[in-house]
Amino acid sequence: MASWNIRSGRNGGLESSLKAMAAMGVDIGFFQETKLTRNIYTRRFEEYSVVATEAVSAAQGGVALFWRESDSYEVEEVVKRGPNVISFELVTGSDRFYIVGAYIPPSDFDAIDEVEKAWQQCPKGCLPMLIGDLNVNLESPADNERGMAIAEQVDAMDLVCMTRQFRQRRRRRVRGRSTWRMRRQGKWVSSKPDYFLGRATTREKFKRVSIRLPRFSNSDHRAIVAVFYTGPRKLLTEYRRRRERFPIRLSKWGPRTEHEAMFEELQSNCISPTPRQYAANHWISEATWTLIDHRAQLRRQGKLDQAQTRRLGREIKARLKLDRQGRAEKAADAVESHLEAGELKEAWRSLKGWYAEASDRAAKPCYESMVRQTKERTELYKAVPPPGAPIPINVDPFDINDEMPGDMELRGIVAGMKNGRAGGSGGIKAEHLKVWFSKILDGVHT
């Protein structure tokens, strides 16, 4: 897991940061100061899923959570707690962590309250952690109201800095425990505004916590990378099985009823569709990446002055504009090729994937929240005695046919079902039912 202030996620900054995290082998992490507005950002890149808050402005603020799927952990209950705070729950088999990622701007007091409110939502039994850029040195906070307020809040949470619990390797470009470094007037100025905070009792859950300088970096901050000890794989498998309700599985042993045998026969005749893969989101060209890497190298060497920053920024922005035009041309070529081949559905999907506005996917709920939600809805819809006189019914009662539907009635219902929908718990789709009824009509049984 990593925490890194990337300075900006606009104009390819988010993609280059994800590329740097993939090169470091990071699975989960937070980005601070993303500066993403209007909910426009890349949702998937380099096998990562991304959820970002909407910053107050394009000049300051914003955080993003990224993760990739793994058999060693589960990411659940991702919640945006404000423009600068995101929380989620991490299940590693034997342990469950409640992690708050935050960015506290230098002149903002609202983010402190957002962190406090998110911290109060920690579920019982979770190990709480606070990760992010606090813009204050907790070891020697500034003698002002903001610095003292953040330091007192961290003390009240009973948190310690995890980078202090491990020996930091001395590298050529990364020395000491500072996480921010900038060259000013020919001298290097450093500080430690970024933190990986947890309870002292959770120190044994980590293999190491180190400060590292990512490649492809256009940031003057260093990343904090923590390596967790995951629990036994068997415990996580049992947890996933416990929360799973579908698909329906027939018992492997014991006699089958008539309807179970018929259902199993129908399932065996279903041809599973080819899994659809996410289209590779590599729309940034190699020429653009070369410019981005060159700017990052100059910043690491301390040779990036203000004039070079503006010149390279304009060049990268112009290259990204050309890359977006190329992406639109590729989408048009794909639509035309599908139309020429008579694949109308694939043409529509290619067009929709290009122009449709991407939205955040629903967060995966944890098992406890599913149980709580089921209980709340059961209480909401349970039968209760009427509060007053019964509602008058002005319609003559009549009998409802509750017999098994006939062949023609079933055919009419199946004919009206829409194609291209999910198969449900049994995996049987509307297309399967229509094919079977057409074969039965022709006297062919499968």
Image (spheres, grey):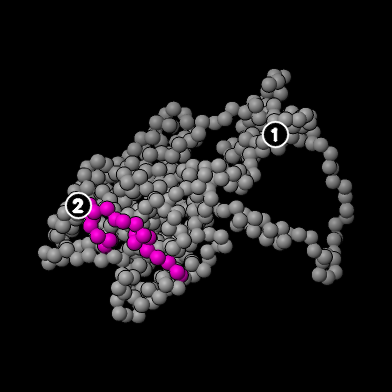
Asked if residue 408 is positioned above or below residue 322 in the image, the reply reads above
Counting from the top left corner in percent of width and height, residue 197 is at 40, 63
Q: Is residue 394 left or right of residue 358?
A: right
Q: Nearer the viewer, residue 394 or 314?
A: 314
SS state under label 2: loop
Counting from the top left corner in percent of width and height, residue 19 is at 32, 46
- How packed mark 2 is, by other alpha carbons closer than 10 Å (few <14, some 14-19, many 20 or more), is few
Identity of the residue drawn at 79% across and 60% down: 383
Q: Type of residue at label 2?
A: Arg
Residue to which mark 2 is pinned: 172
Q: What secondary structure is the stretch in magenta mostly built from?
A: loop
Which numbered disc, 1 or 2, marks the residue closer to the eye?
2
Asked if residue 295 is positioned above or below residue 258 in the image, the reply reads below
The disc label shown at residue 250, or none? 1
- Magenta region, residue range: 157-179
SS state under label 1: loop
Q: Nearer the viewer, residue 438 or 217?
A: 217
Identity of the residue drawn at 76% across and 30% down: 254
- Asked if residue 177 is among those painted magenta in the image, a careful observer would answer yes
Asked if residue 224 is positioned above or below residue 283 in the image, the reply reads below
